[in-house]
Amino acid sequence: MIRIGMVGAGIIAAEHMKHIHQNDHAELTAICDVAPGAAEKAVQQYGGTAYTNFDEMLEKEKLDALFLCVPPFAHGDMEEKAAERGIHLLVEKPLGLDMEEVRKKADILDQSGIITGSGYCLRYMESVQRAKKYLEGKEIAMVRAYRFGGLPPNVWWVDHAKSGGQLVEQTTHNVDMMIYLAGDVRKVSADMALQLCRDVPGITTPDAASVNMVFESGALGHIDTGFFPQPDGRSSLEVLGRNFRLTLEGMDLTILEPEQTTILRGKGDFYKTQDDAFIRAVETGDRSLILAPYSEALRTLEVTLAANESAKTGQPVSFV
């Protein structure tokens, strides 16, 4: 039985706790949250012991794995402390807000030998895996994407210094899919603005962003994102190459070719697939089950933070 600790008891943590509870090979041993009563409430539903202090939890519990579901500004040295004890980690996105700090963490985690996963759950969708297989060996010309959604309820989210903004904190999923399917990025340029949400108390983050990318392959990419008022939320990604257009929308995949159109209606719970894969990897030591390791999540973070920097300076950012 894999003994798992949870840090954070908010919205995304609740999703993970549900799946850990359903997994016959795992046990939710401890839940930690600094908010008074949050961990206690979760423990009433899923069992385990409630904590408000991370160090106390590590000291008192013998954990095999840890899910870190905390805001990007709140990581501190939790990853390092877990790695020192040989505790395997699934770290929710984004990994942080300072690339130098995150790179140091990545080195420590790598040297520790623990298994690491990240919260890029969309990689586990059946449609994304089919898309990746289809694109193998194909030359890509362009990648286009967008994501428009509402303002999250978290009070810290509108503070750009704490969240990194929508591209870093939410639309990072879409950027990660672009990189996962089309390869690494070598240049980013971006424009961002606070247009329609100026009346939101304490807001310092832009509500509209437009980002251009150049991939290592030479393919061109573009993504738009915003959380300003809209009738609905929307998200889509297109990959275009010679005689094909691949579209991912929701959980569905469409591949348009000259002689045929292939449609895959996605099914299943990709959050559960991700969590089950991580637990299985910890149980067996099979790292190939992890589709979004920490090292790759680091690269996605770097691209989104570079976009923030480009929007701030008005200059493109190139990666060596």
Image (cartoon, rainbow, N blue to C red):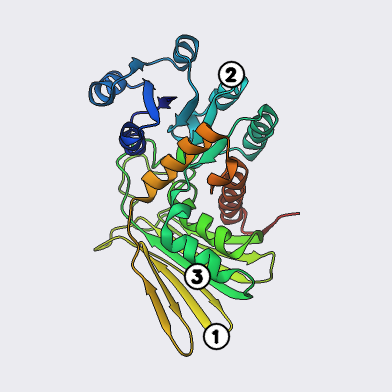
Residue that label 2 marks: 85
Identify the image quadrant of the N terminus: top left
Res. 125 image quadrant: bottom left
Residue that label 3 marks: 144
* Rendered residue at 43%/64% (across/down): 146
Give the CA distance from mark 2 to mark 1.
52 Å
| Farthest residue, direction bottom | 259
Label 1 CA crowd tier, 10 Å (few <14, some 14–19, many 20+)? few
Q: Amino acid at mark 2?
A: Arg
* Rendered residue at 33%/18% (across/down): 48
Mark 1 or 3, closer to the camera: 1
Give the CA distance from mark 2 to mark 3.
42 Å
Q: Amino acid at mark 1?
A: Asn
Near-viewer residue (287 or 176) = 287
Give the CA distance from mark 1 to mark 3.
16 Å
Residue that label 1 marks: 243
